[in-house]
Amino acid sequence: MTYEARLDEAIKDAMRARKTADLACLRMIKSLVAEKRTAPGFTGGVTDELVQGVIASYSKKLAKTIEEVEKTGRGDSPVLESYRYEIELLKDWLPTRLDEAATREIVRGLIAGSGLSGPAAAGRLIGMVMKSHREQVDPVLVRKVIDEELAG
């Protein structure tokens, strides 16, 4: 079953169960996917990668909003609680990411295999990791691990 079909089923299930928070979140994702589909220059159909990208982007946007509002000292807002709930709900829709130890192992292997060293090589290493493991790793974590490995 495609992600778009799964999304439609999840919306129906949320309606049947009267889960308004789930329904609002899933409808937002559906709306964002439709927005991508109707964007100028879009060709082809809606793929699983497109839906996952929309979900990942939306989750990141929510997380960033939470972080910025918490910096102002208003981390107990009911709106932020709904954002946290939506992020948790959407985690099941995203591929699981490798933890820091596994990411470090990948980075060490690429450093050893490529012979790159020094802080100037960070950009090339990030490109190599993201090219081969884009769906498996968190880019922020990759950057952190590469900086640590090249510094140490």
Image: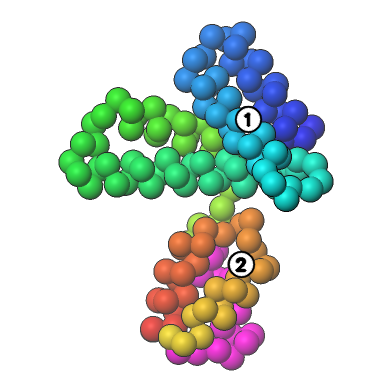
**CA neighbours of label 1 inside 10 A, class few (<14), some (14 to 19), many (20+):** some
Would you place residue 118 above or below residue 106 in this image? below
Q: Is residue 20 visible?
A: yes
- Range drawn in magenta: 102-118
Residue, x 51% and y 14% (percent of image)? 19
Q: Which residue is mark 2?
A: 130
Would you place residue 9 above or below residue 55 in this image? above
**CA neighbours of label 2 inside 10 A, class few (<14), some (14 to 19), many (20+):** some
Mark number, residue 30: 1
Quadrant of image for the N terminus: top right
Q: Does dot 2 land on a helix, a strand or a loop?
A: helix
Q: Position of residue 48 (x, y in %)?
A: 73, 42
Q: What amino acid is at disc 1? A: Lys
Would you place residue 148 above or below residue 14 in this image? below
> Magenta span has 106?
yes
Q: Position of residue 150 (x, y in %)?
A: 44, 83
Q: Position of residue 49 (x, y in %)?
A: 70, 47
Pointer 2 or 1: first along the chain: 1
> Magenta span has 112?
yes
Q: Does dot 1 land on a helix, a strand or a loop?
A: helix
Q: Nearer the viewer, residue 100 or 116?
A: 116
Residue, x 71% and y 39% (percent of image)? 37
**Does residue 51 appear left or right of residue 46 in this picture?**
left
